[in-house]
Amino acid sequence: MAAKKSFKEKLKAEGYPKVSPIPPKMEARLGKGTLLVPAAWEVDELMRKVRKGKVTTAADLRQALAEKHGTNHACAIVTGISIRVAACAAEEDRAAGKKRVTPYWRTLLKGGELNDKLPGGVAAQKEALEAEGHTIVKRGKRWFVEDLERALVSPG
């Protein structure tokens, strides 16, 4: 039985990025064109560009990746998985004693929502963002960065 891969190993997985025609099942939602299945290392690379005091969203990462590869869209599911892989790899780095890790807490969901799938969940992301000067507000059961437009930066 093969040993389980670390998130650092998953970050470097081979075979990606891939560009293909948008599958017929997805054409009703996305239209015709091409779709990028991004590499986790590329997502990590973009996340590293977001400086302290700024944030980005998964949608902004997808747009930057699609533009880089000349495609119409980047796969939302694989981009989301790659964000989590990059975040967990950053925590492996931190556990190994590294001081500078991918600032994954600066990557938000649509509309500036905090991501409960990141290490430590919403509570850890909220704490990290507040430490960088962001105000976090609760709307219903979800948490958001207040004044998102001021803090938002395109990673591309």
Image (cartoon, grey):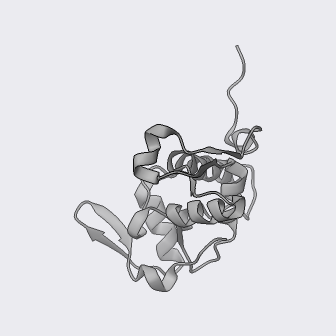
Percent of width and height locating residue 22: 55, 45
Q: Residue at x 47, y 75 (%)?
A: 130
> Which image quadrant for residue 16?
top right
Q: Residue at x 50, y 63 (%)?
A: 59
Residue furthest bottom as drawn:
150
The foreground one among 29 and 126 is: 29
Please indicate, yes or no, whether residue 113 appears anywhere in the rendered image: no
Figure disc tally: 0
- Quarter occupied by the N terminus: top right
Q: Residue at x 77, y 38 (%)?
A: 14
- Residue 5, relative to residue 3: is it above or below? below
Residue furthest left as drawn:
140
Please indicate, yes or no, whether residue 97 appears anywhere in the rendered image: yes
The foreground one among 141 and 58 is: 58
> Which image quadrant for residue 7?
top right
- Residue 93, relative to residue 114: is it above or below? above
Q: Is residue 88 left or right of residue 139?
A: right
- Residue 127, relative to residue 32: is it above or below? below
Q: Residue at x 71, y 55 (%)?
A: 42
Percent of width and height locating residue 27: 46, 46
- Quarter occupied by the C terminus: bottom right
Q: Is residue 131 left or right of residue 145?
A: right
Percent of width and height locating residue 135: 40, 79
Residue furthest front as drawn:
32
Percent of width and height locating residue 34: 60, 50
Q: Is residue 86 left or right of residue 114?
A: right
- Residue 4, relative to residue 84: is it above or below? above
